[in-house]
Amino acid sequence: MSLLAEVLAAAGQAEMVDINIKVSEITEKISSLKLQVMEVTENTYITFLPSFEENEDLLYKSEILSTEMCNLRAFIENQIKREVSDSTGELQKLQDTLQETEFSLSLAGKLILIHRCITEARNLQESLHFVEAAKKLKEFERLLNEDQNELKCIDIFDALEDELIKSQSNFSYSVLEKWKPCITWHETDIDINKTCKQITLHITEGNLKSELIKALHYYDFLVLEINKFGDKLLRNILFLIISKKSRVLVSQEKPQTLLIETENIKNTSCVDVISNLTIVFNFLFLNLSVDFGDRNNFIIELGESISDNFCQYFITNCLDEAVPKRQEELISYEKNIKILIKFDNLLHEIGFLPSENKQLLDYAANVDVLITNKICDCYLESARQLMKKDLHDMIEAGVNYKLLDKEKNEQRVGLVRKVKTVLQPDSDCSVCVSELSPNTYRFPLCQISKSAAELIQLVNALLDETAKSTSEHCALKLFCTARNIFKLYYDIVPLHHKKMLDTIPQQAAMLHNNFYYLAHELLMLGTMFKAKQAVALKNHIITFVDLMESLRSVGNDVLKNQLEVQKKHLLDILRDSGLVTLIENPEFPQGIEKGIRQCTRQLILLQKVWQPVLPSDAYCTSVGFLCNAFVQELIDRVCSTGDIPADTASELVRVFNIVQEKAPLVFPEPKEIYKYVTRWTKFNELVRLLGASLRDVDERWADGKGPLAQEFTVDQVKQLVKALFQISDRRAALLARIN
């Protein structure tokens, strides 16, 4: 071996010995430092004993040892690279030992940093530097969660986690307790009757408020607090200002206080509401416009929380209420729109409304539509109220068909004159003029509900509004609303008054007249509307005629239902009287007379309630229907009886004479019963037959050409002859002739 090689080998051995010594020394120092750190941490967070060694000294020692470790690692790595071919593994073993020692040093350093974060966070919190304290607690949480595999191997890891939770809870409680006095509310009743109250909102000034807002945001508590404040602001201030008569003041003293006095009276001035709201939002912006986070602000977060609810309530309970009900008031309402636009600009400037929120501007942009909708809503609501009114509040409508002869003659002369002006003087042709009845297009005299006439007046007023509209869309909506009022009438009124219609005959008659009256008015309503020159609807078909049939149909159904009720009542009386027992027992039941008299009284009662109300034709048709059902039931029961003794026949004639006497009296002219009661002649023939002899029957049959043959069939006549007369040659001969 050369001398140089021996020298180098000796130098290498010397360096290896020196490295071993240094590693041993650093290992001992780190072990000592680790024990000290563990002892301090355990005493602080487990046994809660005071630490007498300064934390800064431990950190300083840790930093020195960390530097020595870095230098030694670099030297070992260089040595390994230089001696890699000749290394026997000793240097690699030293490096592994050094890495283990470095892990212990890192663990000790992290524990020291955690302890420092906890201590500094407490000190900052006590000095009211809540934002910096929150940052230190966040750093504590990061260190604890960053590489849990390192810390989980020590016994105090659970204690550190508990300390983190406790520190965060303490911090949160302290911040929230400090935040509560920053915004205070007071509500008091001004008068004894509690009709007026005063609400006070006080917001503190100074850096503490801003510090707390930023700290709450840093720990994600701010959104919750803003939501609470926003809900209270809506309920206690904004909603009250919008809905109640209010007075808003801001004190000039420092710090400023917002004072709201409200009365239990509905606010009708949109301008006053906007003025008061402007004061409130300026106050909030002045006292709560605190920036935090990434270009965020307290007012912006407040707007995100409550702006939608505020705008919706403001539009519904203030702006909608202020929309005029007549187009003449549009000019004055446009002033409100200008004030509203200015208020919307304010809300966007302070950040309460986000840039994408255009609810107020969109509302202001549709002035014509708003007014049209308001007019339609008002007229529909007025129509609903009219439909709910009692039907029995009556007025007279229509004309009497019995016109004076003078009127008829004047109209006839006028018609002839018009025809003569059309004919050529030298013409040989002749013209046949068929004169219309003077009652054409006239509504018959009757009683209608006052509400029906008021409904027509309401629709005429609505059509006047339609004629004034310059917008085609608005005019069309107003016209459709007029049509919808009539649709609403025949859909809603029968349902709303159903109970009265089913139980009180006069109500049904009144509503029947109402429907016919409305249908009659619709006949000329479209033509009259066109005469008002609705320019906006010149390209549309303006008519109400198509609604007439629906109105009349519903009116007929109403009266028809009542007639069916009355018919059932009459038939039930007859069937309960014992008339049905004639088939089984030929003896005359004593209850028949009572039942027939009860039926005639019912018809007379209906006469009293219907004749003054219904038109003459409708009244006669209605009572004719009931009389027809009444006598038809009598005819059917008698014709179905197999045996009618002479005494029973005489009694039937006697009680049927009551019907013949009373029934014609329910008509304005007794002879009209033959026109409206189709079975009246047949009933009279039956009465004659019950009291006739075989000879009388033969004469009235007259070989199938007499009045008896006109009303009864062959089988019916034979059945009655067999029931009334005993078996005899004369009866057999008569039956043989009836064929």
Image (cartoon, helix red, strand yellow):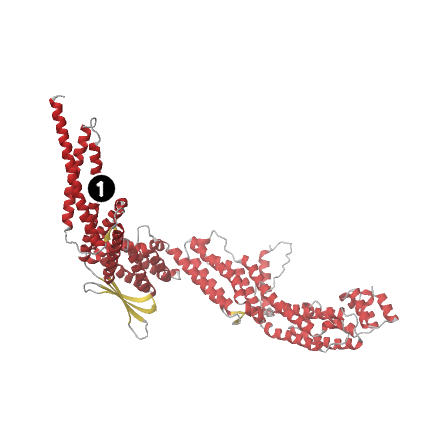
Q: Assign a secondary structure to mark 1.
A: helix
The crowding category of the residue bearing disc 1, from other C-alpha atoms within 10 Å (few below 14, some 14 to 19, many at least 20), is: few
Picture layout, residue 105 above or below residue 431: above
Of residues 380 and 20, the one nearer the viewer is 20
In front: 64, or 372?
A: 64
Residue 200: x and y in percent read: 26, 66
Image quarter (top left, top right, bottom left or bottom right) of the C terminus:
bottom right
Q: Residue at x 85, y 68 (%)?
A: 734
Tell which of 172 and 404 is nearer to you. 172
Q: Which residue sits furthest front?
A: 1
Residue behind mark 1: 103
Residue, far top: 2
| Three-letter code for the amino acid on which mark 1 is drawn | Phe
Give left or right: position of 605 versus 584. Answer: left
Residue reaching furthest right? 729
Which quadrant of the structure image shows residue 203? bottom left
Seen in the picture, residue 187 relative to 528 is either above or below; the reply is below
Visible in this render: residue 297? Answer: no
Please name the residue shown 20% across and 40% down the image.
102
Residue 728, percent from left and from top:
87, 71
Residue 457, how many percent across, how many down?
Answer: 48, 65
| Image quadrant containing the N terminus | top left
Direction from residue 695 to residue 546 in the image, left or right: left
Residue 196 appears in the picture as rendered? yes
* Horizontal relation, residue 71 to residue 589: left or right: left
